[in-house]
Image: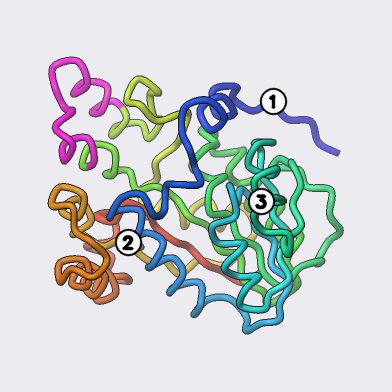
Amino acid sequence: MPQHRPAEPDIRRYYTEVYVEAERLHRKPQGRLEAARTRELLSRLLPPPPATVLDVGGGTGAYAGWLAAAGHRVHLVDLVPAHVAAVRDAHPEVTASVGDARDLPLPDGSVDATLLLGPLYHLTERADRVTALREAARLTRPGGPVVAAVISRNAALMDLTRQGLVDERTRPILLATYASGVNDPETGFTTAYFHRPEQVVDEFIAAGLPVPDLYGVEGPLWPLLDALDAGPDDQLFRDAVACAAAFERDPAVLGASSHLLAVATA
């Protein structure tokens, strides 16, 4: 098997000691919008159940558990041992193992669909992201979808501005991140890479996949939801979901989403 550099230690530390991933998609309005839109998109993009779905970088199982409840056979792989332990406790219907998205000990064409809803934005080197996509394509049966999430290049500056955290110290850091795509953990997040839409296309092609379809997940209204503390039953939340759906394929608006979803067939 190919040898890779060890994963950045602060990624494991961040998700083990600093941040509670299990709360991310329901604690705040922005997370609830991401979850609602991602699930709606996956319902359209994945084969109907029962399908065998590989959830690479699946965290604590927010989507794996939902997919298993819908009738899919799901195996989750994550870099963080604490996440895998949480999945085994909370979702016994999901199999789970610790692993690296760039090198997975599974046979070629062994799954109907592969999700990469986290790894690409924790790999700062293009070569590593292409390797992860190539692994996903290898594992997916011909004609099955490879679905990957990335964080938009614009998201960090938009989010910290919304929080009132842009000042003389953080502004140069955020502008450097906007220029390079490589996040500085001084912003409060861990080691990460933020994509422009055209980079996602480039990396899919470099991995031997077709040109992917791109979807904006949250749409342009996501910064307002946390700022105004919009609940899931509030009109603003419903309008933000509808707005995201209306603009989801518009190239001029894609980068305004916090996350982009890319899909291509293996």
Tell me whether circle 1 and circle 2 mark residues in contact (CB < 8 Å).
no
Q: Residue 203 in the image: state x and y as whole percent.
A: 53, 51
Depicted 161 relative to depicted 53: above or below? above
Q: To which residue does mark 3 refer?
A: 87
- Hey, what amino acid is under mark 1? Arg
Q: Residue at x 32, y 61 (%)?
A: 33
Q: Residues within 10 Å of mark 3 (few under 14, many from 20)?
A: many
Tell me whether circle 3 and circle 2 mark residues in contact (CB < 8 Å).
no
Q: Nearer the viewer, residue 105 or 176?
A: 105
Residue 75, picture quadrant: bottom right
Q: Which mark is residue 33?
A: 2
SS label for mark 3: helix
Q: Which quadrant of the figure contains the N terminus?
A: top right
- Hey, what amino acid is under mark 3? Val
Q: Residue 201 in the image: state x and y as whole percent.
A: 47, 57
Q: Residue at x 60, y 70 (%)?
A: 67
> Is tag 3's residue or tag 1's residue first in the polypeptide sequence?
1
Q: To which residue does mark 1 refer?
A: 5
How many marks the image carries: the answer is 3
| Distance of label 3 from label 1 (alpha carbons) | 26 Å
Q: Residue at x 15, y 71 (%)?
A: 235
Magenta part of the chain = 159-176
